[in-house]
Each structure stands twice: as C-alpha cells, then as structure tokens.
Image (tube, rainbow, N blue to C red):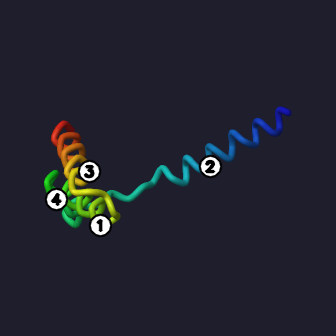
Amino acid sequence: MKKIILGIVFVFASFTMVNANNDIVSTEDVVQFTCDEVASNFASLAYESGYSVEDSIRVYDAIYSNCRQN
C-alpha cells in the first residue's frame, strides 16, 4: 500500500514540475471586448437560436449587469 501511495505522490510531483515552467503570454495580442459587445453577441446568439426578443433582451441585461459588476 505504501508503494502505491508513494507512486501516486511521485506522479503528481512530476506533473507539477513539468507544468511549473509556463511561458509568459503577452497581453498585447489578446483582444479585449467591452461588456456591451459581449452581451450583444450572446443576445444575438440567443435570438438566432430561437429565443424570443424579450428573452434575448433578458439575456443581454443579465450578462451586461454581471459584466459591469466584475
């Protein structure tokens, strides 16, 4: 039993050491969206998926308000 537990510990330790050397990603290439753009995109997707206009507006309001809080 000790060998099994010790083997599991070494497996997790080796994965941690392999993932420890992450590259730093430049944020210059990352596209930043405004809350309005994100909410509009999701509301459009909801409408195109068959939701009513009222439900799409509710989706927009929920996403926009949550985005502005964060």
Question: Which amino acid, mark 1?
Answer: Glu
Q: Nearer the viewer, mark 1 or mark 4?
A: 1
Which amino acid lies under the numbered mark 2 shown in the image of this protein? Ser
Which residue type carries mark 4? Glu
- Residue denoted by label 4: 37
Give the alpha-carbon distance from disc 2 to disc 1, as whole Å: 47 Å
Tell which of 3 and 44 is nearer to you: 44
Looking at the image, residue 25 sits to the left or right of residue 60; the answer is right
- Indicate the quadrant containing the N terminus: top left, top right, bottom left or bottom right: top right
Q: CA distance from mark 4 to mark 2?
A: 42 Å
Q: Which mark is residue 48?
A: 1
Q: Earlier in the sequence, mark 1 or mark 4?
A: 4
Q: Disc 1, disc 4: CB below 8 Å?
A: no
Q: Which mark lies nearer to you, 4 or 3?
A: 3
Q: CA distance from mark 3 to mark 2?
A: 49 Å
Would you place residue 10 above or below residue 48 in this image?
Answer: above
| Residue tagged 3 | 55
Say whether disc 1 or disc 3 marks the residue closer to the N-terminus.
1
Please rate how many residues cluster around mark 2, counting C-alpha atoms within 10 Å: few if below 14, some from 14 to 19, many from 20: few
CB contact under 8 Å: marks 1 and 3: no
Q: Which tag, 4 or 3, sits closer to the chain's start?
A: 4
Pick whichever of labels 4 and 2 is earlier in the sequence.
Answer: 2
Q: Secondary structure at mark 2?
A: helix
Tag 1 or tag 2, which sits nearer the N-term? 2
